[in-house]
Image (cartoon, grey):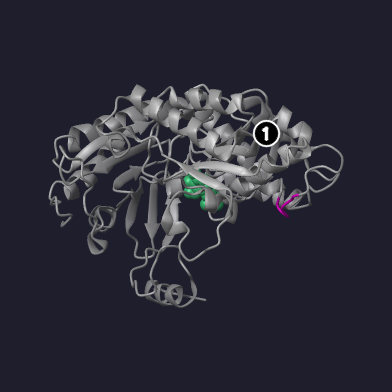
């Protein structure tokens, strides 16, 4: 087929169901090439990818060395199953490496093809772990409002937005949502804005009360993103996770960290667990493990959990693509790049630089309520009024991120009244300035009514 840009748009509209895009939408941005932080579309227009695809392009676009690794592995062994006694060299090498990188005792790896599959697996593992130990009542999963855990019925039920539940009923039973840590909006759950210590006190008290209500011996696990991404890049106070862990431990409840976004350098460490100094029982990862070059996910599972899962007939759940040789080969090469190019340190330093640029260019704008970041996860929270912190109304036809992309070619994402940036970790200072300047050019003329 020899298709021009107009043909591609027409055929896309005719045949592709895009998530979150109404059928009436006529605009398409059809990407054809990528290099570093830049993308090019069918019209030849260039973009700055400040969202890292969907929070994942750690090493940037167009790394031919990753293509070469995939090519070599496909020629050698493209696929064989990892069920039963079968395995492959690349999956073993990657699992060994991940076990070394993860905090002890997370020494076991269960591969998937992405984050949603990973969360399904983690929730089932948690229930199954208790079941095999004879704790058959432990079926409840604690999650948080504003959480995003993917599209499965397990992770989707743990997800804390009504939008993701409406029309899909019945969701998975035995899921209970707690209040998310959101220091900037703590007046929503206190009677006034709370200090970080008070935020943690409030949330830990709520957790204790919820556990008492449900019954401690009926709860399998709590699942949480260490930093909530889709919910608006919500960073908890530094003592939140250690104190939550202590409560869960006291009641024999497992802790699952959904690190689909936060792992592999995004926050300046291999895992956000290390950033917060907390070791969960299971870490779910995906996205940055391959920087998106091929689909892959990996659960890091504690020795104590794996020992139970591996009893008798083993863990009765597998995916066709568990431990895919090409995906695991590319992941290892991607981790090599992160290592060799010092991208963990760069996430911290360039994240701080980008944060500084955003402060310098946007800090004084009346509709900018807060700029927050950890490493290369950044958010600019938009408000109608800085004193009341009322969220900026979002007009569907004038969403700031859409206007920014159309006018400047800089791609950022909208998450719950915040503009979120998660660029490739290789972003340069010039690109950071360009991104901040693009936001300024639109936000400086955005009215408190949301009109641009
Ligand atoms: N968990 C979190 C925290 C995510 O942000 C996402 C996707 O954005 C997922 C899970 C789902 O991952 P996937 O889209 O790879 O299924």
The structure residue drawn at horizontal position 29% and vertical position 28%, both measured from the top left corner, is: 194
Residue 195 x %, y %: 30, 24
The structure residue drawn at horizontal position 50% and vertical position 30%, both measured from the top left corner, is: 208
Q: Is residue 412 magenta?
A: no
Quarter of the picture holding the C terminus? bottom left
In the foreground, 295 or 64: 295
In the foreground, 168 or 113: 168
Q: Secondary structure at mark 1?
A: strand
Residue 198 x %, y %: 34, 24
Q: Main secondary structure of the magenta part?
A: loop
Task: State yes or no: Cβ of the residue under disc 1 lies below 8 Å from any atom of ligand 1.
Answer: no
- Above or below 270: residue 166: below
Residue indicated by mark 1: 301
Residue 98 x %, y %: 65, 31
Q: Which residues are magenta?
A: 317-321
The structure residue drawn at horizontal position 66% and vertical position 50%, both measured from the top left corner, is: 71
- Above or below 389: residue 208: above
């Amino acid at each position: 087929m020899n298709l021009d840009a107009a043909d591609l748009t027409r055929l896309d509209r005719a045949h592709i169901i895009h998530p979150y895009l109404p059928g009436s939408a006529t605009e398409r941005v059809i990407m054809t090439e990528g290099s570093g932080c830049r993308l090019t579309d069918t019209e030849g227009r260039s973009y700055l990818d400040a969202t890292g695809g969907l929070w994942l392009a750690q090493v940037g676009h167009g790394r031919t060395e990753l293509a070469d690794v995939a090519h070599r592995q496909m020629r050698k062994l493209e696929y064989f199953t990892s069920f039963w006694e079968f395995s492959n060299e690349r999956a073993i090498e990657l699992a060994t490496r991940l076990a070394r990188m993860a905090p002890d005792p997370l020494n076991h790896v269960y591969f998937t093809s992405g984050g949603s599959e990973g969360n399904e697996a983690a929730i089932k593992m948690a229930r199954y772990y208790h079941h095999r130990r004879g704790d058959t009542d432990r079926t409840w999963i604690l999650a948080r409002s504003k959480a995003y855990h993917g599209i499965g019925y397990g992770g989707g039920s743990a997800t804390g937005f009504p939008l993701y539940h409406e029309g899909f009923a019945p969701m998975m039973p035995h899921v209970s949502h707690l209040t998310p840590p959101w220091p900037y909006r703590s007046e929503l759950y206190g009677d006034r804005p709370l200090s970080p210590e008070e935020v943690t006190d409030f949330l830990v008290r709520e957790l204790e009360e919820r556990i008492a209500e449900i019954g401690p011996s009926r709860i399998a696990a709590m699942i949480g993103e260490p930093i909530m991404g889709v919910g608006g890049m919500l960073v908890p106070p530094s003592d939140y996770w250690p104190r939550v862990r202590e409560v869960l431990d006291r009641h024999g409840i497992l802790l699952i960290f959904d690190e689909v976004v936060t792992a592999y350098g995004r926050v300046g460490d291999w895992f956000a667990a290390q950033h917060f100094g907390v070791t969960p029982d299971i870490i779910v990862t995906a996205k940055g493990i391959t920087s998106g070059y091929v689909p892959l996910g990996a659960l890091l599972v504690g020795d104590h959990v794996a020992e139970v899962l591996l009893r008798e007939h083993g863990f009765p759940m597998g995916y066709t693509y568990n431990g895919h040789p090409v995906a695991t080969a590319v992941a290892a090469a991607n981790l090599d790049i992160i290592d060799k190019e010092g991208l963990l340190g760069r996430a911290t330093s360039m994240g701080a630089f980008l944060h500084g640029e955003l402060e310098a260019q946007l800090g004084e704008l009346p509709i900018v309520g807060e700029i927050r970041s950890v490493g290369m996860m950044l958010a600019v929270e938009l408000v109608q009024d800085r004193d009341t912190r009322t969220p900026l109304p979002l007009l569907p036809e004038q969403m700031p991120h859409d206007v920014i992309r159309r006018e400047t070619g800089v791609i950022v994402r909208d998450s719950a009244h915040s503009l979120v940036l998660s660029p490739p970790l290789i972003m340069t200072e010039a690109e950071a300035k360009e991104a901040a300047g693009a936001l300024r050019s639109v936000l400086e003329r955005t009215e408190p009514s949301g009109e641009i």
